[in-house]
Image (cartoon, rainbow, N blue to C red):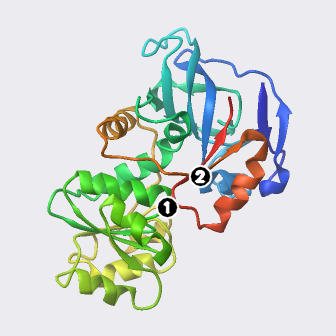
């Protein structure tokens, strides 16, 4: 099979398109013919050594945790799917080495769900990691109808999904973004505020009584600003800064979750969750996709077309 690999922690400069052996299929796995692979910041962080202290890593390393594709073969105990099923998955495994930037990937059934029929292959590949991160963050904070939620980096891949999921839950959403993305946030149902100095004051102008919950998808001073505007300072969650726990907040490292993916797919098919694809590139241009992701100015998702 064709696959993007890196042989060291060299970032985008180390990526190359190569021929690799087809994956082995464990009993509770299926073999997926990859249609598209979502690009996430964690992909290039992994390939720069950013998770080396946490995960065993095997080289040559095939990056990627997001996938949409078609089931091509079944493990001997993979009864949840049939050959030909269209699926999506967040395929973070216990070690790093065999990811989704490839024509074929072996996927544990616990990490897969059926592809939403309303989404293209590219949109579907952009849903799993970002959608699950947003979904798990809001549910871990207990967001419900009537809450006012502050979403930092609301126009990004994760933030834009958090906005839509929170709106679907019945919450009011205030979202931070550059001014060029304010109309985009309004189209998702959020009230936009600009980044930068004076952010807390701008949020207070929209919510004089404070916000009920805040989610940080960008880092920097987002947690500190959140504490200044929250009704309860502990009701803040970050996916960037684990130190948030030391002051009573919460940290999230998204987990594979088939039930969560199914719920997200149901929202998409009901017209309540859109996946905005900022750009689509062929697999061979993975390094270009990473450089664009690293710039941090993407609206929505970057996706690699595989087949």
Residue 293 percent location from the top left of the image: 64, 59
The image shows residue 76, relative to residue 301, as above or below, that is above
Q: Residue furthest top?
A: 76
Taking depth in this image into account, of 142 and 202 the one nearest to the observer is: 202
Q: Nearer the viewer, mark 2 or mark 1?
A: 1
Residue 28 percent location from the top left of the image: 52, 18
Identify the element where label 1 is drawn. loop
Q: What's the residue at 38%, 65% (across, down)? A: 185
Whether tag 2 and tag 1 are in contact, CB under 8 A, the answer is no
Q: Which residue is mark 2?
A: 40
Q: What's the residue at 36%, 40% (across, down)? A: 268
Q: What's the residue at 14%, 62% (across, down)? A: 146
* Image quadrant containing the C terminus: top right
Residue 286 percent location from the top left of the image: 74, 47
Taking depth in this image into account, of 253 and 33 the one nearest to the observer is: 33
Tell me the tag on residue 156. Answer: 1
Left or right: 235, with 107 as reference point:
left
* Image quadrant containing the N terminus: top right
Identify the element where label 2 is drawn. loop
Left or right: 106, with 109 as reference point:
right
The image shows residue 232, relative to residue 30, as above or below, that is below
Q: What's the residue at 29%, 38% (across, down)? A: 270
């Amino acid at each position: 099979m064709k696959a993007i690999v890196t042989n060291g922690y060299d970032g985008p400069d180390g990526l190359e398109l190569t021929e690799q052996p087809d994956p082995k299929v464990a009993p509770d796995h299926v073999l997926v013919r990859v249609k598209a692979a979502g690009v996430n910041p964690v992909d290039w962080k992994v390939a720069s050594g950013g998770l080396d202290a946490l995960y065993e890593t095997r080289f040559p390393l095939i990056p990627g945790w997001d996938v949409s594709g078609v089931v091509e073969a079944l493990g001997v105990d993979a009864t949840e799917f049939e050959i030909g099923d269209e699926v999506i998955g967040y395929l973070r495994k216990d070690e790093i080495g065999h990811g989704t930037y490839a024509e074929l990937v072996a996927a544990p059934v616990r990490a897969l769900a059926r592809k939403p029929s309303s989404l293209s292959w590219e949109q579907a590949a952009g849903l799993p990691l970002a959608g699950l991160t947003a979904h798990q963050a809001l549910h871990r904070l207990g967001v419900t109808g009537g809450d006012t939620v502050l979403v930092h980096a609301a126009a990004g891949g994760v933030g834009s999904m958090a906005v839509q999921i929170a709106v679907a839950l019945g919450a009011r959403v205030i979202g931070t973004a550059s001014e060029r993305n304010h109309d985009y946030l309004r189209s998702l149902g959020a009230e936009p505020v600009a980044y930068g100095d004076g952010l807390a004051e701008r949020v207070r102008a929209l919510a004089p009584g404070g916000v009920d919950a805040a989610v940080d998808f960008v880092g920097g001073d987002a947690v500190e600003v959140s504490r200044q505007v929250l009704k309860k300072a502990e009701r803040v969650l970050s996916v960037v800064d684990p130190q948030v726990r030391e002051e009573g907040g919460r940290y999230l490292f998204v987990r594979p979750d088939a039930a969560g993916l199914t719920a997200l797919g149901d929202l998409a098919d009901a017209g309540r969750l859109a996946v905005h694809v900022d750009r689509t590139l062929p697999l061979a241009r993975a390094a270009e996709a990473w450089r664009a992701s690293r710039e941090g100015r993407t609206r929505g998702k970057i996706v690699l077309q595989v087949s």
